[in-house]
Structure formats: C-alpha cells, structure tokens
Image (spheres, grey):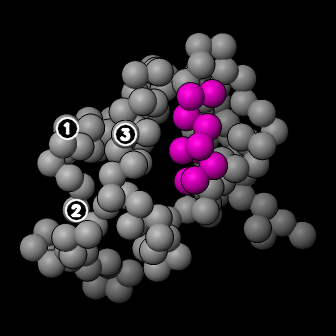
Amino acid sequence: MMGQRNYPKASQIPQKFIISDENKKVEEKLSEIGGRLNYRRLSEELAQEIETLCRDNAIQETYSHGNELQVPDYTHYFMENLQRLSDVDYVPTKEDVLNARVRTTSSANSIIGGGFYLFIFNVDKCT
C-alpha cells in the first residue's frame, strides 16, 4: 500500500536502541500518556522521570542518529528545559513557542505546559 510504513519487528531492532530494563516502566508510562491533550500538566515528578529516561543509553544513541531516525530538532531544547516547563507557574516564552514546531498540512492546536493552548497554522502555502 502506498505511503504505508513498514516498521521493524522488535527482534530486528538493534540492541543499542532498546531501553534498559530499569527504565521500561517510565517508557510504558510515557507511551500510555502519549499525545493525549487531556493530560493535566507536566509535573516535576514526570519531568524527572523523562530526564532519567533521556539519560538511557538507547535514547542517547537515538539522539546521535537523529537525522537518520527523524528525531525532531527541537527535542533537545525541550529536554534541556523540562524543569522550567514543569514549574507550576510556567508561562511559555517566545523561544518555547518558536521551538514548538509541528509538521502540518492544515491548522492544528496543542496544549503545552500548564494547560496553555498553542494554535499552529500552516503557512507553507501562503502567498
């Protein structure tokens, strides 16, 4: 089928890209949360769990192959700012907004820290 992507089976993924056993629970928790828009907010506890997961060798290896694996270039920015983003009084900065890029084909909206709504408009075709 055209446009369908074939993902490798778990047995075909190189070991260097597999999360360590001690970080599996955090990985599962984040996978469950996923892109849910109804998730309350980024808590300090969740930010610490994400930071722990980001230090995992598999995640570091993924970062080092970011261009090949299509890791968004803004990922590092948000990982470096997790504690600030999890602050109860967090207010997005201009830099936060500029780094909150999402590939779009139409307008979209997202919730970022503290329940702020971010509306994203596709301006690629504007003339």
Q: Earlier in the sequence, mark 1 or mark 3?
A: 1
Vertical relation: 84 (above or below) 97: above
**Residue drawn at x 33%, y 52% as measured from the top left:** 56
Give, as a three-letter code, the residue at label 3. Thr
Magenta span: predominant SS is: helix
The part of the chain drawn in magenta is: 75-84
Asked if the residue under mark 3 is in contact with the one under mark 1, i.e. CB atoms within 8 Å, the reply is: no
SS assignment at label 2: loop
**Residue drawn at x 28%, y 67% as measured from the top left:** 17
* Horizontal side, residue 110 vs residue 44: left or right: right
**Residue designated by label 3:** 52
Label 2 – label 1 distance at C-alpha: 13 Å
Vertical relation: 1 (above or below) 83: below
Q: Residue furthest bottom?
A: 2
**Residue drawn at x 63%, y 49% as measured from the top left:** 77
SS assignment at label 1: helix
Q: Position of residue 99 (x, y in %)?
A: 69, 50
Give, as a three-letter code, the residue at label 2. Ile
SS assignment at label 3: helix
Answer few, some or many: residues within 10 Å of disc 1's Cα (few below 14, many 20 plus, some between 14 and 19): few
Label 3 – label 2 distance at C-alpha: 15 Å
Q: Position of residue 72 (x, y in %)?
A: 55, 62
**Residue designated by label 1:** 25
Vertical relation: 54 (above or below) 92: below
Among the 4 quarters of the image, the one containing residue 94: top right
For this rendering, which residue is in front, 60 or 8?
Answer: 60
Give, as a three-letter code, the residue at label 1. Lys
**Residue drawn at x 41%, y 48% as measured from the top left:** 54
Answer few, some or many: residues within 10 Å of disc 3's Cα (few below 14, many 20 plus, some between 14 and 19): few
**Residue designated by label 2:** 18
Badge nearest the viewer, 3 or 2: 3
